[in-house]
Image (cartoon, rainbow, N blue to C red):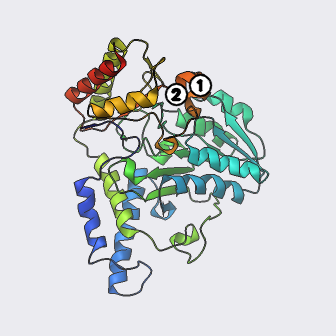
């Protein structure tokens, strides 16, 4: 089977599992406990925090471990907005992951004014458009680093600079970009990005499911969403998942020492895209043609049923998706494609192929051939 759905999740890397092992066994203690076993767990947790901070160019005390990217994004949007005294206005792009969009809409239901930034046909946000909507009462801006659905990479540094001129905290959802720190425009260095908050998830880069993180720059106020025991400086109460945190840190570390470069994967992607466009009549690439994730190729296939195409591909040993796993089974067209100007009936023909550094040209060629066969070239 050829697995081309890594935007949904990635296989757990063996080295990550090895790193987690001690904290699933002998160092199983509660990191808040003041005895030898608790001390071992706490040491592992704090080393993981330090390793993550190093990968982000940040301070360890700015890192909060969460249950995943969704919780991290919720905490960033709601927590920053609720803690800011300057007003009740939030700005997000129209193509954000539901974790961001629904957090913003929840704020709208409790009295905040929500602005959803439009995007162009490639899914890009224009910094001038952001500048035009910022107000004296804007509390937080959130624009994703890269799209899970179409792969477009946003000009986050330029957008964050606009927000900084208005002294507005800027959050970016880096869940999809975190696996590619060696690709142009996808650095995780928070100083280079100029952001005040960043969220990511372990299972999108070879780590375990159920753990993520939120980084918030020191000095930016955040109202915690989870109260209780005061763990993690009171930012997120609850006994920490030490093994998960260690696994996340290990996965981040391994992305920086990957054998196959992001440029090599992008070249394979481009060959795959060319093969699909040549062999599948009517197929159209979605997202920016060049400014996109290295392992991401997404298409619309007008005149075909997206779901039936996926089923037929799976019968031929190719696993992919129609878009966000969070919307799997929904009859509604992708909000991302609709925001990009794709008609709803065409958006429902989407097929997304996402892959990591281990994919081969032969596998991608087989996938392109399978798609051509399914679509009856």
Mark 1 is surrounded, within 10 Å at the Cα level, by few (under 14), some (14 to 19) or many (20 or more) other residues, namely some
Q: Farthest residue to the bottom: give it.
A: 35
Quick one: quadrant of the N terminus?
top left
The percent coordinates of residue 311 (x first, y second) are 37, 33
Residue linked to disc 2: 348
Asked which secondary structure carries label 1, the reply is helix
Residue shown at 45%/63% (left/top)? 60
Residue shown at 29%/53% (left/top)? 12
Residue 265 in the image: above or below residue 72: above
Q: Nearer the viewer, residue 316 or 26?
A: 316
Q: Kindly tell me whether residue 158 is visible in this rendering.
A: yes
Q: Nearer the viewer, residue 42 or 11?
A: 11
The percent coordinates of residue 31 (x first, y second) are 41, 77
Residue 22 in the image: above or below residue 106: below
Residue shown at 26%/34% (left/top)? 317
User: Could you say which disc has been placed on residue 92 in the image?
Assistant: none
Residue linked to disc 1: 344
Query: How far apart are the alpha carbons under marks 1 and 2?
Result: 6 Å
The percent coordinates of residue 297 (x first, y second) are 39, 28
Asked which secondary structure carries label 2, the reply is loop
Mark 2 is surrounded, within 10 Å at the Cα level, by few (under 14), some (14 to 19) or many (20 or more) other residues, namely many
Q: Are marks 1 and 2 in contact (CB under 8 Å)?
A: yes
Residue 242 in the image: above or below residue 330: below
- Which image quadrant for residue 180? top left
Residue shown at 33%/83% (left/top)? 37
Quick one: quadrant of the C terminus?
top left
């Amino acid at each position: 089977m050829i697995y081309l759905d890594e935007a949904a999740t990635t296989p757990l890397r063996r080295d990550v599992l090895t790193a987690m092992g001690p904290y699933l066994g002998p160092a199983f203690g509660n990191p808040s406990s003041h005895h030898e076993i608790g001390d071992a767990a706490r040491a592992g947790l704090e080393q993981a925090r330090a390793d993550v901070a190093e990968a982000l160019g940040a301070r360890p005390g700015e890192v909060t471990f969460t249950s995943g990217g969704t919780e991290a994004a919720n905490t960033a949007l709601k927590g920053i907005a609720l803690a800011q005294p300057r007003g009740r206005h939030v700005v997000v792009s129209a193509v954000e992951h539901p974790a961001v969009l629904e957090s913003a809409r929840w704020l709208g239901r409790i009295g905040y004014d929500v602005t959803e930034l439009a995007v162009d046909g490639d899914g890009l946000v224009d910094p001038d458009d952001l500048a035009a909507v910022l107000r004296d009462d804007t509390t937080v801006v959130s624009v994703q680093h890269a799209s899970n659905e179409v792969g477009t990479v946003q000009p986050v540094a330029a957008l964050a600079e606009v927000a900084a001129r208005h002294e507005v905290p800027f959050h970016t959802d880096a869940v999809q970009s975190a696996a590619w720190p060696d690709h142009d425009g996808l650095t995780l260095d928070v100083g280079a990005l100029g952001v005040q908050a960043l969220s990511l998830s372990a299972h999108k880069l070879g780590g375990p499911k159920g753990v993520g993180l939120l980084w918030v720059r020191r000095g930016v106020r955040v109202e915690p969403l989870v109260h209780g025991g005061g763990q993690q400086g009171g930012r997120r109460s609850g006994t920490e998942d030490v093994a998960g945190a260690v696994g996340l840190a290990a996965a981040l570390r391994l992305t920086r020492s990957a054998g196959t470069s992001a440029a090599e994967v992008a070249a394979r992607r481009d060959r795959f895209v060319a093969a699909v466009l040549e062999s599948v009549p009517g197929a159209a690439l979605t997202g920016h043609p060049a400014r996109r994730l290295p392992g991401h190729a997404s298409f619309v296939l007008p005149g075909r049923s997206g779901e039936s195409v996926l089923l037929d591909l799976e019968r031929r040993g190719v696993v992919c998706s129609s878009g966000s796993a969070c919307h799997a089974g929904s009859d509604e067209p992708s909000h991302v494609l609709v925001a990009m100007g794709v008609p709803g009936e065409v958006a429902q023909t989407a097929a997304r192929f996402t892959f990591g550094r281990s994919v081969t040209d032969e596998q991608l060629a087989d996938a392109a051939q399978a798609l051509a066969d399914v679509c009856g070239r």
